Image: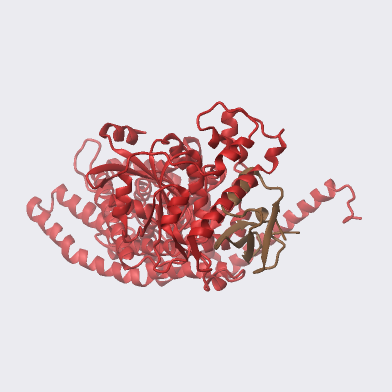
Chain colours: A brown, B red
């Protein structure tokens, strides 16, 4: 199990849980389709790796690395 | 509220336009109401509700365009505005607009609205010729049990079909099948209307609902993973719909090959700066400059000459009305009017950047730097729009998740050099720096940005420490608005500029001219006679600016008038110096006999820096007050004035030192000074560290 910040670029992973996310943020990422069992792919990282570009449910989304570190994948 | 009362009085039924951000709500709003509201290919262009009447065959409705939302639980201020509006208008018909290319994600909000129990029409917007997802609309309508219409909000395909549905009587749609089973899981006996919706919101741990019902969810284990549970149930429902109605091409929405370069970790930020430099170069120093010169020649030889000749023949050259016409209107307004091509071009390029979808990529590239300064990548949008007009840019700060981040972004936006300041740079800079004015103007733009970012860091470390920004941002696909859109944007900006010049600027110029040419006993006196009202006031304020190098009454008066609108500064200078066009003003600025005269390039530079920073214009202050409150607006204006004064003082003395001792010597001195400061800071931090350390492993 890895967090989304630790995965290799352009490899598909499956979301299997969340950690250390506030209710507000968890609710939002769930609304955006980052639900358990969903496949996700990290496509790019910003210069200091503080933001990630991910692909989920057929669209692209950027999230902060702090939030991505709370999304557990396998 | 007033609008709603009006609506009730006129018996116009309201219809709300609701959807995810960037799905085409405002495009549909413009289509239905024949309006021209601002649209863009960016998350959160609409930050407040807008309403307008539209006729639907023989009936009139009032359409309300709301900011984009992802669910009925808010994360930012503008989302809260939309959600509150929906909840207080539950007996209103709703157009829920979805993007056909991203319908799977968009349906999550549709389900949220259905859970609430509203009368919904699902509008699937497809603005592309080849959509990424084909949909069986009839089946989708059957599965959701609501009317579904496919439209193209850009060209109006199927709009009559939508209008026919809107004429149907109000009927609350049935809730999705999973709602009752989810509601049963909640172990509370809720004594509220719409029990099912409130139960789901409790499972989602919506803070507002918990506060409203005064319930503590921490004791029950059910709520440990209830947010995920609700999301899973919703998306399972969507998966079921997807399997029956959607046929996806497999392509990713928003994905583009060009992103490999534009989002490259090391290239993204330099490329953005390069694009920005290109925009400024095209606007101010090539295309824009040629157009501006052509317009100046046209204005001088046509309107200017006609107005001057006409007023001379009617009133005579000695009349004060002739002076008002030639000095206030031809000289003052004409000078600003000649910058029309450049201002229109700047707005066109900014709108092109906004429409293209590139700004989301820029926000991603800037997140690292902005995050460190207590801002978010999303602030890029507000700051960039600040180069156009601070007033509208301040409003976009509503995109921020956190109140403090919103206040900070709103307060920093006026530091961006807006288009109204550009005539000042061109005229004054052109007179003193010639061809090198390009670098002076570029330097001023960069100075404004650097000061804004440094100030953000100071605010973050002191009074406005914001919460971690979520920076959740969708990537829209790259789009080109088309020729019609370009023409619309150009026309809009030309119209806005002309209205501004024709109303505010003429009024201000007339006021300034009258004050500068009439004494307190209301007798006509020539400007610079020592007895006019403005001269007396200017002389009273001028000593404040002596340390900055420009302590004359003319400059002080122009700066005071510039608080209303920055363009007034240059038009006032034109009036005071009796100049009728740009070249006249430039020549008069180096003439010691003029009212406004700058003794050296250092003084001119000092004045430019002060103009860049000293104060937001009156309309920006009004928007600031509306957005962040009176206290913060007052604070922002005071800080900005003090900062402008200190920065100008520093720049002026530095420029004087350059003039006196030469560039190399001063630069060496500055480098040495910086080195000494760094050494002192290092020693202080080491000293602090050694005092606080109690023998950690590193020290041992």
Q: Is residue B70 left or right of residue B295?
A: right
The C terminus of chain B: image quadrant:
bottom right
Residue nearest the viewer, comparing B569 with B222: B222
Residue at the right extreme, as displayed: B700
Residue B541: % across, % down: 40, 42
Residue at the left extreme, as displayed: B314
State which quadrant residue B523 falls in: top left
State which quadrant residue B441 falls in: bottom left
Q: Is residue B7 left or right of residue B438?
A: left
Residue B118: % across, % down: 44, 40
- Is residue B250 positioned above or below B227 on the image? below
Residue nearest the viewer, comparing B176 with B336: B176
* Residue B548 visible in the shown view: no
Numbered marks: total: 0
The N terminus of chain B: image quadrant:
top left
Residue B629: % across, % down: 47, 37
Which residue is located at x 53 percent, y 48 percent? B400
State which quadrant residue B668 falls in: bottom right
Residue nearest the viewer, comparing B697 with A69: A69
* Residue B389 visible in the shown view: yes
Residue B621: % across, % down: 42, 43
């Amino acid at each position: 199990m890895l967090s989304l910040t630790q995965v290799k670029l352009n490899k598909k992973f499956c979301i299997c849980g969340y950690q250390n996310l506030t209710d507000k943020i968890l609710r939002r990422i769930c609304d955006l389709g980052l639900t358990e069992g969903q496949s996700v792919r990290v496509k790019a990282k910003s210069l200091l790796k503080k933001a990630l570009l991910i692909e989920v449910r057929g669209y692209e989304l950027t999230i902060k690395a702090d939030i991505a570190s709370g999304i557990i994948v396998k | 509220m007033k609008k709603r009362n009006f609506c009730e009085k006129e018996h116009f039924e309201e219809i709300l336009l609701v959807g995810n951000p960037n799905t085409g709500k405002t495009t549909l709003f413009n289509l239905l109401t024949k309006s021209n509201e601002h649209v863009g290919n960016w998350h959160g262009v609409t930050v407040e509700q807008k309403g307008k009447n539209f006729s639907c065959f023989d009936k009139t409705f009032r359409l309300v365009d709301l900011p984009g939302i992802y669910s009925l639980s808010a994360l930012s201020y503008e989302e809260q505005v939309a959600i509150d509006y929906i909840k207080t208008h539950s007996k209103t018909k709703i157009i829920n607009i979805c993007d056909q290319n991203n319908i799977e994600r968009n349906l999550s909000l549709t389900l949220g609205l259905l859970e609430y129990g509203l009368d919904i029409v699902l509008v699937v917007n497809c603005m592309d010729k080849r959509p990424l997802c084909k949909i069986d609309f009839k089946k989708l309508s059957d599965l959701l049990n609501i009317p579904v219409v496919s439209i193209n909000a850009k060209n109006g395909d199927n709009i009559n079909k939508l209008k026919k549905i809107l004429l149907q009587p109000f009927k609350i749609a049935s809730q999705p099948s999973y709602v009752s089973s989810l509601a049963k899981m909640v172990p509370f006996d809720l004594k509220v209307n719409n029990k099912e919706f409130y139960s789901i919101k409790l499972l989602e741990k919506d803070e507002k609902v918990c506060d409203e019902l005064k319930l503590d969810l921490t004791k029950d284990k059910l709520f440990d993973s209830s947010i995920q549970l609700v999301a899973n149930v919703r998306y399972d429902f969507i998966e079921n719909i997807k399997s029956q109605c959607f046929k996806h091409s497999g392509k990713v929405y928003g994905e583009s090959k060009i992103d490999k370069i534009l989002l490259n970790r090391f290239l993204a930020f330099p490329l953005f700066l390069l694009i920005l430099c290109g925009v400024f170069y095209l606007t101010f120093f090539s295309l824009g400059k040629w157009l501006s010169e052509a317009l100046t020649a046209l204005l001088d030889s046509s309107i200017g000459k006609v107005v001057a000749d006409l007023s001379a023949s009617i009133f005579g050259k000695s009349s004060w009305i002739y002076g008002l016409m030639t000095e206030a209107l031809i000289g003052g307004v004409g000078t600003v009017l000649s910058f029309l091509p450049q201002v229109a071009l700047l707005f066109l390029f900014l709108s092109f950047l906004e429409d293209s979808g590139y700004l989301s990529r820029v926000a991603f590239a800037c997140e690292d730097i902005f995050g460190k300064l207590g801002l978010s990548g999303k602030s890029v949008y507000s700051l960039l729009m600040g180069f156009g007009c601070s007033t509208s840019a301040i409003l976009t700060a509503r995109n921020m998740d956190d109140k403090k981040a919103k206040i900070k972004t709103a307060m920093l936006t006026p530091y961006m050099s807006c288009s109204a300041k550009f005539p000042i740079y061109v005229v004054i800079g052109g007179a003193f720096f010639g061809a090198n004015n390009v670098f002076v103007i570029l330097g001023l733009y960069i100075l404004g940005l650097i000061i804004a970012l440094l100030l953000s860091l100071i605010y973050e470390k002191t009074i406005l420490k914001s919460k971690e920004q979520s920076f959740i941002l969708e990537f829209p696909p790259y789009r080109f608005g088309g020729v019609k859109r370009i023409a619309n944007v150009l026309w809009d900006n030309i119209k806005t500029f002309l209205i501004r010049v024709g109303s505010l600027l003429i009024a201000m110029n007339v006021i300034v001219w009258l004050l500068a040419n009439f004494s307190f006993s209301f007798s006509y006196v020539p400007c610079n006679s020592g007895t006019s009202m403005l001269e007396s006031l200017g002389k009273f304020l001028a000593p404040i600016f002596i340390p900055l190098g420009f302590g004359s009454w003319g400059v002080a008066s122009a700066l005071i008038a510039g608080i209303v609108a920055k363009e007034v500064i240059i038009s006032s200078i034109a009036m005071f110096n009796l100049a009728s066009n740009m070249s006249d003003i430039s020549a008069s600025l180096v003439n010691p006999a003029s009212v406004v005269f700058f003794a050296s390039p250092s003084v001119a530079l000092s004045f430019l820096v002060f103009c860049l920073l000293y104060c937001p214009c009156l309309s920006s202050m009004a928007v600031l007050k509306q957005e962040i409150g009176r206290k913060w607006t007052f604070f922002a204006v005071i800080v900005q004035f003090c900062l402008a004064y200190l920065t100008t003082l520093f720049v002026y003395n530095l420029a004087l030192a350059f003039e006196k001792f030469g560039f190399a010597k001063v630069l060496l001195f500055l480098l040495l000074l910086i080195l000494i400061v760094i050494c002192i800071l290092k020693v202080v931090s080491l000293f602090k560290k050694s005092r606080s350390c109690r023998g950690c492993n590193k020290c041992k």
